[in-house]
Image (cartoon, rainbow, N blue to C red):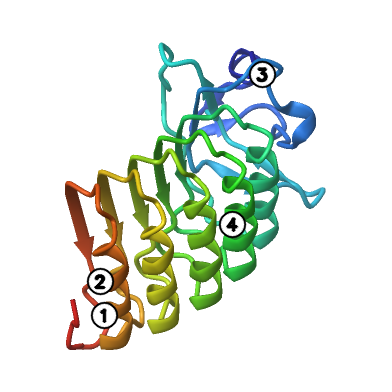
Amino acid sequence: MLASHLYSRSSVQNGASSLPPIRFGPSLLPRRPLVTFTFLHGIFRNKGGGIGFEPPISLLRPSDSPTRAAQPFFQIGDKGASDLGSGLAKCINLSNLTLQLQCNEIGDKGASGLGSGLANCINLSNLTLYLQRNKIGDEGASDLGPALAKCINLSNLTLNLSSNKIGDKGASVLGSDLAKCINISNLTLQLAWNQIGDKGASGLGSGLAKCINLSNLTLELAQKQFICFGL
């Protein structure tokens, strides 16, 4: 399995890898179906323009667990996020996914590319996606929403988009798309420190009201400026 391949090539000495970065792409996808994919945010660009991983990156069976967290390098941009999405698109049997991509340089194109990949993961039931402190605006949020709507088996979702550039349009579209995730029962949605006003909050609330199977909701909407929430 790919997990053992990655671990066998990776070692950490004084917090840095002693080997060249491992490239990620379709050629490195596991031959056996993935059930759980935990992607930790120790990732960086290499000199060839691709992306590499500071260990560990874990492609795990349900019985496996990551051994140690990597340090972030804060350099993933649109291309890196899109490349990651292209790889995930091949993992059609994925049911549990955790992506930690916070504190990077991902913008609208990167969010869109990542969303395109997630849209193919139709068997996802548990998704945790950390994208806070990036550069995602209305366009990126609007493209990410339809991808989530295609994950028809999604029941548990944690989506952190705090400290980005999302405004009323992005929040409203995201709410409309989440309404299509009819099987969601547990939702944590973090949109604090964006540019969402009363219209965006109202649109988001209208969408969430249509999540008929929602039993647990955590919603964070504190913004940079005072707004009147229309929830």
Q: Which of marks 2 and 3 is nearer the N terminus?
A: 3
For label 1, the SS is helix
Residue corresponding to mark 4: 75
Packing grade of label 1 (10 A; few <14, some 14-19, many >=20) is many
Label 3 amino acid? Arg
Q: Are marks 1 and 2 in contact (CB under 8 Å)?
A: yes
Label 4 amino acid? Gln
Q: Distance between the residues labelled 4 and 1?
A: 34 Å
Packing grade of label 2 (10 A; few <14, some 14-19, many >=20) is some
Residue at point 69% right, 27% down?
Answer: 19
Residue corresponding to mark 2: 205
Residue corresponding to mark 1: 202
Percent position (x, y) of residue 71? 46, 41
Percent position (x, y) of residue 200? 33, 81
For label 2, the SS is helix
Q: Which of marks 4 and 1 is nearer the N terminus?
A: 4
